[in-house]
Image (cartoon, helix red, strand yellow):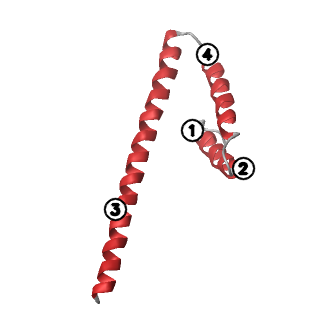
Amino acid sequence: MSKDTKNKVIRLADHAHRRKSHVDREAQLLMEISNEIDAIILSHLQAGDVEARDLAGLLSHRLGTLMRHIEGKEKLWDVCEKVLKKQAAID
């Protein structure tokens, strides 16, 4: 293998490592946010402040507002719908 080819392979491997590191950080952040949302929801459900149905409606409203500002929302909606149905055991 030529020196030039080796350098390209090294750069590619380094780029892949940086990308994986970024993805790992992003996944960790999303997990932290998910845990924070869960804590808020559970706190109010356990306190009896609100019904699960009302919280589901509230979250739906907030998701719709968030998605209003996202490009490619139709494709994202398809994914969200599949995830929601799976998590809710619908179908």
Residue at the disc numbered 4? 51
Pick whichever, 59 or 88, lies toward us.
59
Q: Position of residue 82 (x, y in %)?
A: 63, 46
Quadrant of the image for the C terminus?
Answer: top right
Residue bearing the label numbered 2: 74
Disc 1 crowd, CA 10 A, few/some/many (<14, 14-19, 20+): few
When the figure is inspected, residue 26 is found, relative to residue 49, above or below; the finding is: below
Q: Amino acid at mark 1?
A: Gln
Residue drawn at 38 percent across, 57 percent down: 20
Query: Do residues under tags 1 and 4 come within 8 Å of each other at their CB atoms?
Result: no
Q: Nearer the viewer, mark 2 or mark 4?
A: 2
Q: Report which residue position mark 1 lands on.
A: 87
Residues under labels 1 and 2: Cα distance?
20 Å
- Left or right: 4 in relation to 81: left
Q: Give me the C-alpha separation between circle 3 and circle 4.
A: 45 Å
Q: Quadrant of the N terminus?
A: bottom left
Count of marks, rendered view: 4
Query: Where's residue 49, x and y in %?
Result: 56, 10
Residue drawn at 42 percent across, 40 percent down: 29
Element type at mark 2: helix
Between the C-alphas of marks 3 and 1, the distance is 32 Å
Disc nearer the start of the sequence (2/4):
4
Residue depicted at x 35% and y 78%: 8
Judged from the image, the secondary structure of the residue bearing numbered disc 1 is helix
Q: Amino acid at mark 3?
A: His
Whichever of labels 3 and 4 marks the residue nearer the N terminus, that label is 3
Q: Nearer the viewer, mark 3 or mark 1?
A: 3
